[in-house]
Amino acid sequence: MAVSREHHITVVNGYRNWRQCGMAEPRMLDALKDGAIVFLQGVNIVFKLNGKPSGICYEDQTLPNGTQLQRAHWYAPTGTSESIFTEALKRGETTFSLTDKTDSLELADMREVEVKFQHQSYTAEEVLEKTRRYALERPQQIPETFGERRITREEYLVENGQSNWDQG
């Protein structure tokens, strides 16, 4: 079994000119429904793979290296670390670890969970609660196919992931 290396995680406030768009919350709800979610072992963040990989911290946490994660905040992997998440999806793994001495992950604290559009039928607290409940249930495997069209994991990445990484 892989040993968690959460002490190799650092958090920065924001990143370059990135922003977490207002569609992040609807995409999180879609990813929760689809099962396109991954977890990093030992970290209280649910990462969506719909749109740019990013996640919601569902409970305050202090990592062994002193890094603070804040409840109801969005975190996005910076640099080339996004591939860690997409590779987990391709393998069907819902939980992965940083195991190699060179593995590290920088996360940008993007913003708080919020609902930016008046027409949304849910609140920021409901998005957070659905995320927290999903984390507690934590499925062991990502589905082989998604939705009524039964698209594969690879197709899901193209339609909802890699091609949309410039969006929320």
Image (cartoon, rainbow, N blue to C red):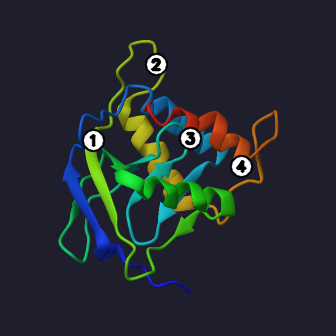
Image location (x, y in percent) of residue 149: 82, 33
At label 3, the amino acid type is Gln
Density class for disc 2 (Cα within 10 Å; few <14, some 14-19, many ≥20) is: few
At label 4, the amino acid type is Arg
Which callout, 2 or 3, points at the residue further toward the start of the chain?
2
Residues marked 1 and 2 touching at CB (< 8 Å): no
Task: For marks 1 and 3, give the CA distance.
Answer: 19 Å
Which callout, 4 or 3, points at the residue further toward the start of the chain?
4
Task: For marks 4 and 1, give the CA distance.
Answer: 27 Å
- In the picture of the structure, the residue carrying the numbered disc 1 is 110
Residues marked 4 and 1 touching at CB (< 8 Å): no
Task: For marks 4 and 3, give the CA distance.
Answer: 12 Å
Residue nearest the viewer, comparing 104 with 2: 104
In the rendered view, would you say 102 is above or below 49? below
Image location (x, y in percent) of residue 24: 43, 33
Of labels 1 and 2, the one closer to you: 1
Image quarter hosting the C terminus: top left
Residues marked 4 and 3 touching at CB (< 8 Å): no
Q: Which mark is residue 139?
A: none
Of labels 1 and 3, the one closer to you: 3
Q: Which mark is residue 153?
A: 4
Density class for disc 3 (Cα within 10 Å; few <14, some 14-19, many ≥20) is: some
- In the picture of the structure, the residue carrying the numbered disc 2 is 120
Of labels 2 and 4, the one closer to you: 4
Residue nearest the viewer, comparing 22 with 88: 88
Image location (x, y in percent) of residue 60: 26, 59
- In the picture of the structure, the residue carrying the numbered disc 3 is 162
| Res. 92 visible in picture | no
Which callout, 2 or 4, points at the residue further toward the start of the chain?
2
Of labels 4 and 3, the one closer to you: 3
Which callout, 1 or 2, points at the residue further toward the start of the chain?
1
